[in-house]
Image (cartoon, helix red, strand yellow):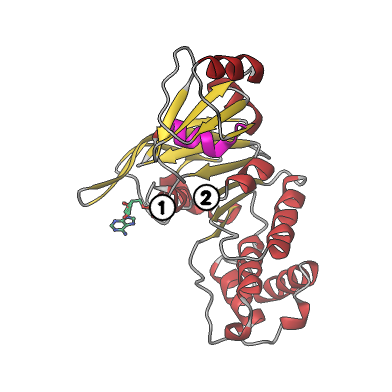
Amino acid sequence: MNVIEIKSITKYYKNIKALDGVSFSLEEGNILSLIGPNGSGKTTLTKIISGFSKANSGEIKIFGKNLDEFKKIKNKIGLVPQENNLDQDINVLENLIIHSELCGLNTKVAKERSLNLLQKFGLDKYVHEDTRNLSGGTKRKMMLIRALLTNPKLLILDEPTIGLDPAIRRQFWNIVIDLKSQNVSTIFTTHYMEEANFMADEIAFINRGKLILSGKPQDLIKNVLENFVFEMKEKVSIDGYKSYVYENKTFIFTPNKEILLSNLKLKGIEPSTIRETTLDDMFLYLTGEKI
Ligand code: ADP
């Protein structure tokens, strides 16, 4: 079953086209990473999927429902927005209880769930702490806890680990992997390519409001480029190979290092680096832009 099905959605902010005919689906229990540079439309897409913004055209189904039936599915969706929007003036438990009540939980259940989640995430020592005193990483975890209060079946995370140190990032992702084992589906935006590669069942590249390619991380390179890339410090043109030039450097892709090496030698060209192709190469090859 598909948890999300989106067809040709378009979104304008006055005359800015933030999304331009985006289509994709997310299968239940899968993790999808949306990758693109700043301004490519990632946040806009997460806002639309989580019901905080409306597309101008296109079709959106979440858990098989149109967004005009959003109330029926609201509590099945947990959103962690990019900006910290916790109430800084109240304590941790109060923040979580108020949110739960807004989602329709009664106070007793809200308190029970909040305390359970705080304990599970190792934050029980902060129950009565003023929210403003927490570290950035702890606030981020608290936003994830807040998103989990309704036991959602779909998590939407907008740049969830930006600015976090590697240890907290790992903890954060372990929680998402644990939720996946309970069949919770996740969509997250990032511009950390290695994070997407490691976490996602599926990756979707977005650039200038258009979804340019999607697939399983291990298939993307295989389907579009070759396994190895040669970097040259100058502009080089060589027929029969996929290549691109970026900032006066040439990147040539090949499945066979030896053959390309001898072809280059014949032309008197020496590569500066030979390495495996990465998803960053893919993005640059497809868009001419860096993430
Ligand atoms: P990303 O999350 O990939 O950085 P966004 O979805 O935030 O991209 O932005 C996509 C485009 O829409 C950008 O050109 C951005 O400037 C524009 N945009 C986003 N939000 C607004 C808004 N509230 N009003 C006007 N323009 C916006």
What SS does tag 2 mark? loop
Residue flagged by tag 1: what amino acid is it? Answer: Asn
Q: Is residue 115 above or below residue 206?
A: below
- Residue named by callout 2: 191
Say whether residue 23 is visible.
no
Using the image, determine if residue 161 lies above or below residue 212: below
- Residue at 57% in and 28% down: 229
Residue that carries the numbered disc 1 in the rendered image:
38
Report the magenta residues as a range. 276-286
Count the numbered circles shown: 2
**Are circles 2 and 1 on residues that touch, CB within 8 Å?**
yes
Residue 58, quarter of the rendered image: top left
Judge whether residue 173 can be spotted in this image.
yes
Q: Is residue 171 left or right of residue 16?
A: right
Q: Is residue 246 magenta?
A: no
Residue extending furthest toward the left: 15
Mark 2 or 1 closer to N-term?
1
10 Å crowding of disc 2: few (<14), some (14-19), many (20+): some
Say left or right for 76 vs 22: right
Specify the amino acid type for callout 2: His
Mark 1 beta carbon near ligand 1 (under 8 Å):
yes
- Separation of marks 2 and 1 at Cα, in angstroms: 8 Å
Q: Main secondary structure of the magenta part?
A: helix
Asked whether residue 280 is drawn in magenta, I would say: yes
The residue nearer to you, when weighing 194 against 134, is 194
Q: Quadrant of ligand 1?
A: bottom left
Question: Around disc 1, counting alpha carbons within 10 Å, would you say few (fewer than 14), some (14 to 19), or many (20 or more)?
Answer: few
Vertical side of 23 occupied by 170: above or below: below
Which structural element holds mark 1?
loop
Residue drawn at 62 percent across, 18 percent down? 255
Residue at image position (72%, 82%) is 126
Residue 290 sits in which quadrant?
top left
